Image: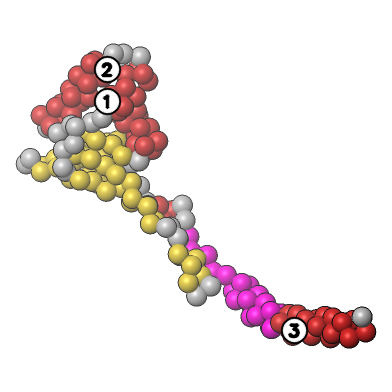
Amino acid sequence: MIKLLEQYFIEHEVLDLPQLGTLRKIKKEANFSDYNWTMPKEFIVYDNYQNKPSSQFYSYIADNLDISEQTAILQLDQLVNDFLASSEEELTIGSLGSFKHNEGVIEWLTAYQSEQYFSPIDLPILAQTSNESESEVESNKWIIGAFSLLLIALFLIIYKYY
C-alpha cells in the first residue's frame, strides 16, 4: 500500500490522506540572470487540512491492488488508523519522506531534496557571444542601409530613363 501511495504522488503530484492531510509538490522554475541559470527547485509541502481523497485516488489503489474501491477505502483507513493508534511514531511514504506524530501533532519530514538533481549553470561563453553578436547586428544595420540606398538609387535611375 505504501508503494502505491508513493507512486500515486509521483504521477499526480498530490496525495490526500484521510485524517493526516495533503502532500503537494510545488515547483519553482529555473531563472536566467547575469548569464547564469539558477536551478529549479521542487518541494513537497504538507498541509494538515484534511481533504477527502478523490474517487480517482481510491480507483487507482483499487485497480493496482485488484480489489474493490470499497476495500481500498477500508485498507487505507486501516493503515492511517494503525499509524495514529500505534506507538510507532513514523509512517514512511517510500522515498518521499515520513509522517511523524507526537502527542496528537502530525508533522511531515521530507526526504526529497531537489538540490541533488539540479545544479546552477554558469554561461560565460554566452556572455562573450552576446557581445560579439551585438557588434554583428550593428554592422548588419549598415549593410542593410547601404543596400536600401542602392535599391532606391537604381529605382530612380530606371524611372528617369523610362
Q: Mark 1 or mark 3, which has the lower sequence index?
A: 1
Q: Nearer the viewer, residue 97 or 44?
A: 44
Residue that appears at 42% across and 57% down:
29
- 2 w.r.t. 110: above or below: above
Amino acid type indicated by mark 3: Gly
Q: Is residue 128 magenta?
A: yes
Disc 2 marks which residue?
69
Q: Is residue 8 visible?
A: yes
- Magenta-highlighted residues: 119-138
Q: Mark 1: which secondary structure?
A: helix
- 142 w.r.t. 66: above or below: below
Q: Mark 2 or mark 3, which has the lower sequence index?
A: 2
Amino acid type indicated by mark 1: Ser
Q: Nearer the viewer, residue 95 or 127?
A: 127
Is residue 23 rendered to the left or right of residue 41?
left
Amino acid type indicated by mark 2: Glu
Q: Nearer the viewer, mark 2 or mark 3?
A: 3
- 73 w.r.t. 26: above or below: above
Residue that appears at 7% across and 40% down:
104
Residue 144, x across and y down, in percent: 75, 80
